[in-house]
Image: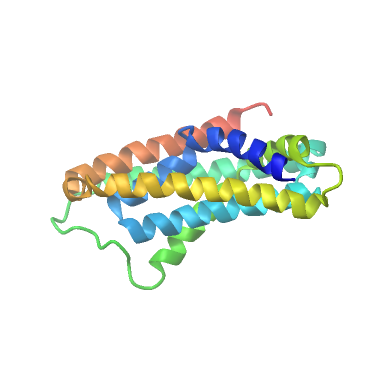
Amino acid sequence: MTSALWSFAVVAGLVTIVPGLDTALVLRAALTRGRRVAFATALGVNTGVLVWGAAAAAGLSALLTASQVAFTALRYAGAAYLVWFGVSMIVKARRPAQGVAEPAVREGGGLVSAWGRGALTNLLNPKIGVFYVALLPQFLPQEAPPLVGGLLLALVHNVEGLAWFTLLIFGAGAARSWLERPVARRVIDRVTGTVLVAFGLRLALSPQ
């Protein structure tokens, strides 16, 4: 099992540092909302990854590869969420600046909302489930209990993801004083919103 964990850590580490939707969400939060919200978003992302890992280990997400209807339904739901989220950012960025920086955390559940966005973005992406279904069996030893072994591998991925997000968050903090300007914030929201819409459309239009 130790050898399997190390082997999986190498593959998962390479997947983690490839720029993608998760990186865009966490980086945007770090640049515009501060470290606390960025870490809440990162924990949400990792929660979604852990749930998919557990589902794959338990054999639940294998249904996505067996049922075209289930995969398509989840794919369209995820695509709709990403497009809605991205468009809302773009629309918000088009509004006139008020000259006052938005607080890093809104009262009444700002951190919870950030965590929820990160988690929901991952949970509504069926390709993560398919990724785990395809990858985990390659690294699980035959003698290891599938659920326990799958959770351990997913935890390795989570630790690597959190380490990568921590580097991004603290790195973004160095430029945040300049990026807090209303014009810079609008640019960040437009770019991130466009990325989200592009990911959503790609997810909706992908054949598999």
Q: Residue furthest front?
A: 2
The number of numbered badges drawn on the structure is 0
The location of residue 41, given as percent across then percent down, is 45, 55
Q: Quadrant of residue 125?
A: top right
Residue 47 falls left or right of residue 34: right
Q: Residue furthest left?
A: 99
Q: Quadrant of the C terminus?
A: top right
Q: Is residue 115 above or below residue 139?
A: below
Residue 58 visible: no
Residue drawn 19% across and 49% down?
96
The location of residue 67, given as percent across then percent down, is 81, 39
Residue 113 falls left or right of residue 174: right
Query: What's the colour scheme?
Result: rainbow
Q: Residue furthest bottom?
A: 108
Q: Quadrant of the N terminus?
A: top right
Q: Nearer the viewer, residue 167 or 57?
A: 167
Residue drawn 54% across and 50% down?
159
Residue 167 falls left or right of residue 136: left
Q: Quadrant of residue 207?
A: top right
Q: Nearer the viewer, residue 190 or 38?
A: 38
Residue 8 visible: yes
Q: Residue furthest right?
A: 143
Residue drawn 28% across and 51% down?
32
The location of residue 176, given as percent across then percent down, is 22, 49
Q: Nearer the viewer, residue 118 or 83?
A: 118
The location of residue 131, given as percent across then percent down, is 67, 36
